[in-house]
Image: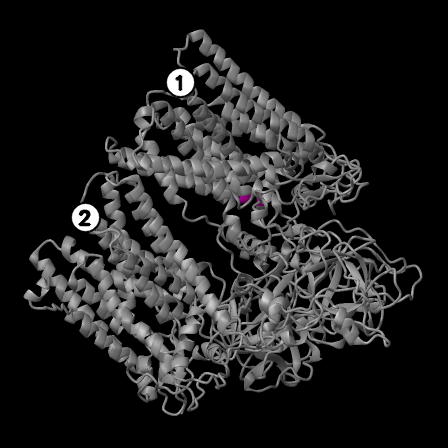
Amino acid sequence: MLGFLKRPIVVTAEVNLNMVSLTVASLLSRLWCLSYPRAVVFDEVYYGPFISFYMNRVFFLDDSGPPLGHMLLALGGYLGGFDGNFLWNRIGAEYTKNVPVWALRLLPALAGALSVPMGYQIVSELRFSHCAAIGAALLLLIENALITQSRLMQLESLLIFFNFLAVLSYLKFFNVQKHSPFSPRWWFWLMLTGVACACAVGTRYMGIFTYLLVLCVAAIHAWHLIGDQTLSNVRVLCHVFARAVALVVLPAVLYLLCFYVHLTLLYRSGPHDRIMSSAFQASLEGGLARITQGQPLEVAFGSQVTLKNVFGKPLPCWLHSHQNTYPIIYENGRGSSHQQQVTCYPFKDINNWWVIKDPERHQLVVSNPPKPVRHGDVVQLVHGMTTRFLNTHDVAAPLSLHAQEVSCYVDYNISMPAQNLWRLDIVNRQSDRDTWKTILSTVRFVHLNTSAVLKLSGAHLPEWGFRQLEVVGEKLSRGQHESMAWNVEEHHYRTSQEQRGQELELHTPMKANFSLNLSFMARFLELQWRMLTLQSEEAEHRYSSTPLDWVTLDSNIPYWLNPRSSAQIHLLGNLVIWASASMATATYVLLFLWYLLRRQRDIHDLPEDVWQRWVLAGALCGGGWAVNYLPFFLMEKTLFLYHYLPALAFQLLLLPLVLQHTWDHLCRTQVQRGVFSALVVTWYSAACHVSNMLRPLTYGDRPLSPGELLALHWRDSWDILIQKP
Amino acid sequence: MLCASGRLLAARAETSLFAPPGGRGPALRFPRRELHFPGQLNPPLWDSLTGRLTRHNASPHRRVILKWGRMQPAVGRGLAGSELRLRKSRCGSRAARSVGRDGAIQATARSPKPPRRSSRRFEEVGRQALLALVTLLSFATRFHRLDQPPHVCWDETHFGKMGSYYINRTFFFDVHPPLGKMLIGLAGYLSGYDGTFLFQKPGDKYEHHSYMGMRGFCAFLGSWLVPFAYLIVLDLSKSLPAALLTAALLIFDTGCLTLSQYILLDPILMFFIMAAMLSMVKYNSYANRPFSAPWWFWLILTGISLTGALGVKFVGLFIILQVGLNTIADLWHLFGDLSLSLVTVGKHLMARILCLIVLPLVLYMAIFAVHIMVLNKSGPGDGFFSSAFQARLSGNNLHNASIPEHLAYGSVITVKNLRMAIGYLHSHRHLYPEGFGARQQQVTTYLHKDYNNLWIIKKYNTDSDPLDPSFPVEFVRHGDIIRLEHKETARNLHSHYHEAPLTRKHYQVTGYGINGTGDSNDFWRIEVVNRKFGNRIKVLRSRIRLIHLVTGCVLGSSGKILPKWGWEQLEVTCTPYLKQTLNSIWNVEDHINPKLPNISLDVLQPTFPEILLESHMVMIWGNNGLKPKDNDFTSKPWHWPINYQGLRFSGANDTDFRVYLLGNPVIWWLNLVSIALYLISRSIIAIAMQRGAQLSTKVEELTRVLLQGGGQVLLGWMLHYFPFFLMGRILYFHHYFPAMLFSSMLTGILWDTLLRLFAGGLASSSLAKSVHATGILILILGTAYSFYLFHPLAYGMVGPLAQDPKSPMAGLRWLESWEF
């Protein structure tokens, strides 16, 4: 009892002053004058609108990456009290007073600053020396490109932060594993690995490669564990299971969670709605929902509807017809039916309305009670404005020659009888007698005479068709393509004069309420799918570059220019560091191959534990560089220099490791070591010097004369903005 | 496919909706630039009065769009590791295996009783007889009703036509290397086909033309697939039942059968792939007798087959990759064998380099040499190639033409864009309409030869007529500042800070000035790409760029089609982005200058390496260009193994003779199950071994077959399947067939081994034997019966479609997506 009182209470604190000073220095370098310039810098113009959308809770779609990064930027805005009212229209525009620039830039800057001590930790956890760890941190600290990128509202520094966090926590976990598996620390680091991986993937799709790398390393380590016969089978199973949960299930759940938050936050309709399906749009507040709320759910004979194409490429559009007819003779000399044009029109229009008619009845109104249309029913589609029937026949379509022309039937020509019966085919039906539901059902119209399917061909009609999209009857319907699927968007029951609308409404069995019946998973899947398949136009950009330019730093990106003082910010790396980092990577690969070949001949240059560390360091740091760099060669999108920064960060970790290895194992004599240390010191001073010279371009804080700018124009391929007097 | 005709390319463009304000493009934009092959869109014969559309069943499958874009390199990743491990484990077991000298001995060693000499001979004869039986069955099925249908089926329209081109020696362009078509042409030539049949579209009757030679040749090669697979499996598993099962799967597969019966590249390709695999397996089995005669024989044969595979289609790269991985693993193991001196290892390395790299390269180039020598007449493929290339072809207007070699001031020239299908720099007496920059004369590119393509080179600062005989000839040099005057309208090529009509980020290019007098916006600096200053500019050979002096932009063509006001010619812009793309590089094609001596263009003929390089660039470009349209249903790689949908080879209606390329579903689904089963059993075994489980020698031997032999073919399957997921080009069902061969081999090995393992657990060995035999027999008979059911798909059928309940095939339409 109270035995613990017999001893004094002692708190032993171990403070690694190196770490502290590194952190302070990096915070200074990243946070210094953070709100300068008070103007939109480069890609802030791209991310800014998304922040505003979050502030206003308006739905948007961005194909550049998952929403976590955007949300973190917006979090800064939220904490700084940003109201979202700023027009992000051009680079260089001055921020108004209501934009909390400092708060908006704070999170990326903090992430960038914390990467420095994390670099230190990673190298220590790789069991390399304290000097190497400091070296890595110092390189990260003074690298100009990393500083520039962290100081702005951009996502790369967040990605680097999460990448490092994933690697670091895995290393910690791996080191704990050796002596105390299943301890709380073990669990903590394991879980943190999964969380960091999920965050990395959630910030940028590129993060998935780092995640896969960590997963691979973890799998190899787990495989060794399986081979460890001192462990019981149950224990091995527990190990594998714990890893699977933490590294596979947890990240997947977190990824979903980040979309969940995203979709919960953005509940208002906005400018990007159009590209989503009708059901998705109807689940947003305002926009389509305002129209569709309360309209009858089941389509009946006599319903008046607009039909939207489900595929919607190249543009989302509605089935449309108008008074104009197909030209008698096309430009290339072919003829047409000269009947009324049927097109797909990307804007809402009164001509988009169609009435579903029962072929056996003459009235165009809904009977009482309404007779719902079911899968397999034969219908006629009557164009609302012209009351002509949707028709297709054995005539080649205007642009897609193998397909049939679709027209609204006009009986100019007796030799062509009306063929206007369509069989309704509900694609996502639950049962064979399912009814046709507004918005929810995707349907195909199969022509009864020719079994052609109504399809959006995606081609733009020429001037005579007002550049609207061509609609055809596809005869060789191979498989089900979404361009053949349509859904009802707007819908109401058509009533005759005598019939009171309200009376009918009373008999309507079900009303639509879509925000409730579209589940999160359905919304997530659709959003994710659209994000991945959205084809952004191959935008040529003045400052885009190719992956090959990055290693040699052949290009830079001018981020911002003060037109009065010529002060400017550039994304520009430290040449000395980039060159030596690439050389170090090459050296690592050559040394590794050399050792590997010699080991295969049974010559062991390195002791086993050193070799293990060397391989693990290479796998994580060199591998980190490779997985963050090489995939870009396969990508078709427009690439910029900043895409290289995550790879570079890993490369900077590898550099001191190679240096230390050289010192430990390749410098045999004291003289060699002395010379080598001197070289390293010289090299680092050079790097610092270069870094300092480029400082005005990193911070943009100093007016520069044309002479000074010319002095910084070290490479012809660099774009330094020199204004003519 | 592309090559089908000499129709020129035309481009169509859709304007972008809006340009991004800042760093990147905004999120929501749709259109992309695309290039069409309008040639593919054969206008159907149209009779506007009757309103009848002739059935156009020719090319909807093959309808293609060209789009600029980079190729996704079709390289499977992440496979090396598994292969390495696999080979390593084999190395460990080498000692155990070295007891037996070859397969026969080892297989017999497995039987409990020591074999007597007579029984061994008997067994040997039995093996030969089985092999003969398998081969015979294969030939019989492939040659049965080979002449049916007597009309062009599916891609015969392309490859038959290309065979004819070889016989007629006309130049054409195709996205595949030439060997396959050369062989088809040769077969046709030898069998008396005269190359006169047009192969216009599927369904055309052959009538009196001799087509059986070509079909027979393809069927002949296709028939060898079965014995090859048989031998590969026999060698990998040392088990006759496994080999027999594999052979049965392939003999009775309707898909393989159909694909082997027509004039296509696939049977030829698969022949070489399997030949390479077989010879690789064989030379592996001689690993204990390196540098012996059979070892060399199989090694060289591997190299030759690899060339064959690559020479037919670029898909051959995958088998090269497989052999490469196998060789690297092999060498790595040899290197680690300390009993071998480094010199010996070096000899091994040299042997492989010689036979697997040098020899195939030489052969491959030889194929191209023959290809280029044979095709020496101008033909439909000319337009795809550069001016210098065309000069080789007799009948082309550049052939034997003689023009001055170096550009001089006063020369009249045409300027051609280096990018394919863009054409010549062109202008005409029409202005840009209101709303498209300055209302000055249009400058476009045009694909056809025309007087409006002619331009005169003038000095920027003098107006004196350089053709005046009193002036000396002055050559244009790299870096000179020039003016280009349009000959017909006497306006200068001009650019200024106005938006280009379609590409809003570029500057507009116009024709400006009166009778050659303009302003300083007409000055262009002419630069030769990759040459030093001071060099003259050569006709055809020099790649030049024109840089606008005032704005510093580069003359280029965006490849987008102008609307009607621009006569649907292509847009010319001046791009401020100084990146070097082919769009902004030009060469001089025609050149008229009376003051200069004409030289024959033969002097300028490209060298063989240049021709080789250019052909490959064009092929790769063509392959990349085969992009599916957004709104069309296309075959996806995941459809293939589940046999989701076939391809119509011939006929669509109930009165037609219909042939439908579809795998025998029983076999394909068995293959699919087998792959899953294999992966499961493999992981179980691997984990058990990692946990240190003790296996009896018999089980260990079986698992080794499963891990090594099965691993080898599984790797083949993966290499021939997964890369397709990365490909951007349009894909077809028949691309899966090489992978399908491998997966059938895997099935054979897997079921034999699993049955043995299972039977091994039974008490008596006679019971075990009969269980095993029954299992294999059931599988073989099952596939045979399914073949009996599905054989009309391959051999052709007439009558109601399968949707119709009256059709005899109605009960066999197991998936709704099948259309026979």
Residue B498, quarter of picture: bottom right
Front residue of A683/B293: it is A683
Q: Are marks 1 and 2 in contact (CB under 8 Å)?
A: no
**Residue at figure coordinates x 34%, y 48% from the top left:** A219
Residue B815, quarter of picture: top right
Label 2 Cα neighbours within 10 Å, binned few <14 / some 14-19 / many ≥20: few
User: Please, what secondary structure does the residue beneath circle 1 have?
Assistant: helix
Please give the residue where the numbered disc 2 appears in the rendered image.
A609
The answer to whether residue B470 is visible is no
Front residue of B193/B596: it is B193
Indicate yes or no whether the magenta region holds residue A334.
Answer: no
Amino acid on which disc 2 is placed: Asp
Label 1 Cα neighbours within 10 Å, binned few <14 / some 14-19 / many ≥20: few
Q: In the image, residue B771 lies at what x, y percent?
A: 50, 20
Above or below, B765 against A253 in this view is above
What mark, if any, has residue B110 been given in the picture? 1
Q: In the image, residue A221 lies at what x, y percent?
A: 29, 48
**Residue at figure coordinates x 39%, y 40% from the top left:** B83
What mark, if any, has residue B387 been given in the picture? none
Amino acid on which disc 1 is placed: Arg
**Residue at figure coordinates x 58%, y 31% from the top left:** B250
* Distance from Cα at disc 1 to Cα at disc 2: 44 Å
